[in-house]
Each structure stands twice: as structure tokens, then as C-alpha cells.
Image (cartoon, helix red, strand yellow):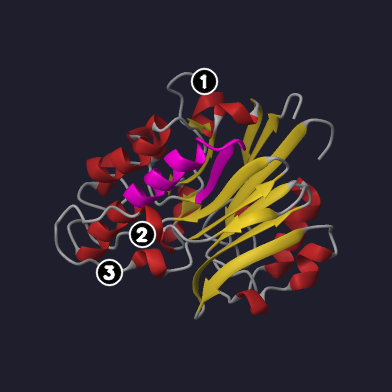
Amino acid sequence: MGGTTLRLATWNVNGLRARAARVATWLDAAAPDVVLLQETKCDPEQVPDELFTSRGYAWSARGGSGRNGVLIASRVGLDDLRDDLAPYAPTQSSTGEPLPDLLAEPRFLSAICGGVRVASIYAPNGREVGAPHWHAKLHWFATLRAWSSAALNEAAPLALGGDFNVAPRDVDVWDPSALIGATHVTSEERAAWLSLIDAGLIDAAQALATSDAPTAFTWWDYRGGAFHRGWGMRIDHILIDPRAGSLRACSVDREGRKGDLPSDHAALLVEFDRGGA
């Protein structure tokens, strides 16, 4: 960590082993202090260790059966790992009916890095509005909200980063009319995401944008030439506890979405001053 500035990045890599070379190039160019990865699609023992250790990162990961998966890599310490949201789950789902157990999936990992409690977040997709997995997504967010509220009362400031699978505002999608009735943009999902802001976190990208101006998209479908047409969404976010420090910069690695075998997501990086931390 250079001086008192912390560089925190998040990226849904959509397969860490398949994109290890891309991740290596990005790590060398972006030089984040802390890296949050999602959809690694590998068990911890399958993570390419040298990709991180050769660059001075300690790392920890959760994964299972080639699906989902989250990872934290840090050059500023990696302590007090936590990976279980289930104790914070509401006692009953919003529907009152049994739901798919998404809390058992490897979608959450947290650690203290550089004096900040960071969490790598891979929120459920939701599949179809009104379906059991959609209700389970809302239940998962309610659980994350409860965990975040507890974490915000601890000494270390909090930062959540990852693929939240929610576009918070209409300006965060290429064409709101094209997504009517789809997941990621419903009022219920947006309210679930906003509950994290209401808990006391700041949307770094929006905080650093010009008032009401569009912020950069982070995801484009592989199909239909969506990337080249600009048909994207802002569904990857870094949410910062004000106690973590002053935000300096926020950027999306749009170039990383180009070329051969890209992820459908682009990396998001935030810099903030830790002050006297």
C-alpha cells in the first residue's frame, strides 16, 4: 500500500483458471492492494497459487463443484477470515415458504486487509422474477444487510465489493424499457441493494460521478454484440464505509472486456485515502 492510499478492486472473472493469463496482465497493470474476485468456478485447491503469490499476494477462496466461487487476495494483510452469512439470516423468508438454500453456496468471503474489513460478494442472479430463486435472492440480500449492519459496528471500517446482480437506477442500464419484467432492475431488488446504503455504506462509483450522470457499465452480455453496441449494465459495485477514508478515484477497466476470451464483466477499482490509519 503506497502511503495511506488503498487500492481495492473487484472483478467477476467468470472462470479464474480459464482467464488466469488475463488476470495476471490486469494485476500487473492495475496493481491493486486488495483484490476481490467472483465466479471463480473452482475449488480453493484449484486456484492457480503462483498467480497471486508471485506478485506478493496472500489469498483465500471459497468454491464448490466448479460453480460460483469467491476469492480475496491481499498485499496488505489477510486476517480474521469469515465465510458464513447463515447466522444472520432472517428467521423466515418474505414468502413464508421454503426457498433454495443460496446461503450454502460459495458467494461470500470476508477478511481484514490493510485495517479494513473487506468482503467479496457474488449475489445470486434470481433467474426469473417471482420464481423461488428470485425470492431466495431477496432473502440472501436481507441476510447480507444484517451481516453488514453488525460489521459496521465493529472497529474496522467495512468495504463490500463484487457482483451484486442489481442495477440500482434506470441510468445504470442501457435501455430500461428493454428490461421490463426482468431480474436485476425490479423495485424489490433495488430496495434490497439500497438497504446496504441505508445501513451506512457509500456507492463509490456514484459518489465520485457528476450529479445524476451515468456511471460506467461493468457487464455486457456475450450475445448479440452487446459490448460493441453499448448494451451494458452496472451491476458490480464497491460499497465503502465512510470510516474507511476519503474516496479519491473509481474506474472500470473497459479495455479488459475486449480481445480474446474476456469475462463478460469488467474490473472495478476504487482508491481511497486511509488518513492516519
Q: Earlier in the sequence, mark 3 or mark 2?
A: 3
- Percent x, y for residue 93? 21, 56
Residue 158 lies in magenta, yes or no?
A: yes
Q: Which of marks 3 and 1 is nearer the N terminus?
A: 3
Residue at point 22% right, 46% down? 180
Label 3 Cα neighbours within 10 Å, binned few <14 / some 14-19 / many ≥20 = few
- Percent x, y for residue 173? 38, 41
Q: Which mark is residue 210?
A: 1
Left or right of 91? Residue 84 is right
Q: Earlier in the sequence, mark 2 or mark 1?
A: 2
Q: Name the residue under label 2.
A: 125
Which element carries disc 3, helix, strand or loop?
A: loop
Q: Quadrant of residue 11?
A: bottom right
Q: Which mark is residue 61?
A: none
| As drawn, 111 above or below 201 | below
Instruction: Identify which amino acid the numbered label 3 is placed on.
Output: Pro
Q: Name the residue under label 3.
A: 100
Left or right of 263? Residue 105 is left
